[in-house]
Image (cartoon, rainbow, N blue to C red):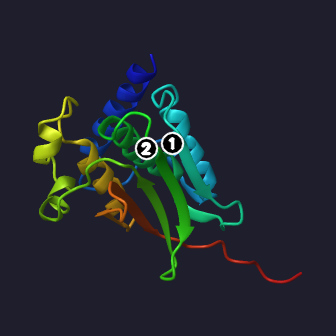
Amino acid sequence: MAEIDFEADRLAQLVDSLLDVRTRRRSHTGATALAFTHPASVVQGALHRIRGLSGERPLQLDVSPRLPLVQLYANQMGRVLANLIHDAIRYSPAGTPIGVSARITEQAELEFTVEDEELGIPAEHRERIFEPFVRTQTAAHSKVSDEGLGLAICHSTVLAHGGRMQVTTRPAGGARFSVFTPAPLPTKGPRQ
């Protein structure tokens, strides 16, 4: 049931993305409204979306409660993180941990990171994996069925936020997917 729920959510995201490809605007109700949100809420929303899919997989969370509120589409960003976490679960060895973190960078960007202990992504494929229907040879030869759209949809959503995505290899091995978005902070009103 959890897999069906997750895949139904991914299909809804795909339809939304295809319908809004030119305008990059979401015309739904408050669930997708641009609002000030705590990064921990986005991470928790992503984890809620994949509930039941992680099994016994250890999740290592590093999201400080002291992070500021940032303005973003929390529902959409939660979908991006859920997809990245789900991919990490599917492509990395069973029982290995998945790391999820959030921080504000020195460039005043919000960075979400999902790390795993898979084989990593070869340097020559790191830009192409964000294109529709592209899979690396390692992924194509895995037993994981995948149409090659998840990362392209995630990339499109992040670009619509004015952000960017990158993938690197962790020093200890494995992949590190980072999502960077501008982090506009709430402005303080006039003193009373």
> Where is residue 75 drawn, in percent x and y?
50, 46
Evaluate whether residue 133 shows in this view: no
Residue under numbered circle 1: 46
> Where is residue 70 drawn, in percent x and y?
59, 65
Image quarter (top left, top right, bottom left or bottom right) of the C terminus: bottom right
| Amino acid beneath label 2 | Arg
Q: Are marks 1 and 2 in contact (CB under 8 Å)?
A: yes
User: Is 162 above or below relative to 149?
Assistant: below
> Where is residue 148 drawn, in percent x and y?
18, 41
The disc placed on residue 79 is: 2
Query: In this image, 125 relative to 74: left or right?
Result: left
Please tell me which residue lies in front, 187 or 3.
3
Evaluate whether residue 1 shows in this view: yes
Callout 1 crowding tier (Cα within 10 Å): few <14, some 14–19, many ≥20: many
Q: Which residue is outermost to the front? A: 172
Badge 2 marks a residue whose secondary structure is helix
Q: How many marks?
A: 2
Please tell me which residue lies in front, 154 or 32.
154
Please tell me which residue lies in front, 187 or 173.
173
Badge 1 marks a residue whose secondary structure is helix
- Which quadrant holds residue 171? bottom left
Query: In this image, 139 relative to 65: left or right?
Result: left
Precedes in sequence: disc 1 or disc 2: 1
> Where is residue 142 drawn, in percent x and y?
18, 34
Image quarter (top left, top right, bottom left or bottom right) of the N terminus: top left
| Amino acid beneath label 1 | Ala
User: Is 99 above or below relative to 188?
Assistant: above
Callout 2 crowding tier (Cα within 10 Å): few <14, some 14–19, many ≥20: many
At 53% from the left and 58% from the top, the residue drawn is: 101
Query: In this image, 114 relative to 185: left or right?
Result: left
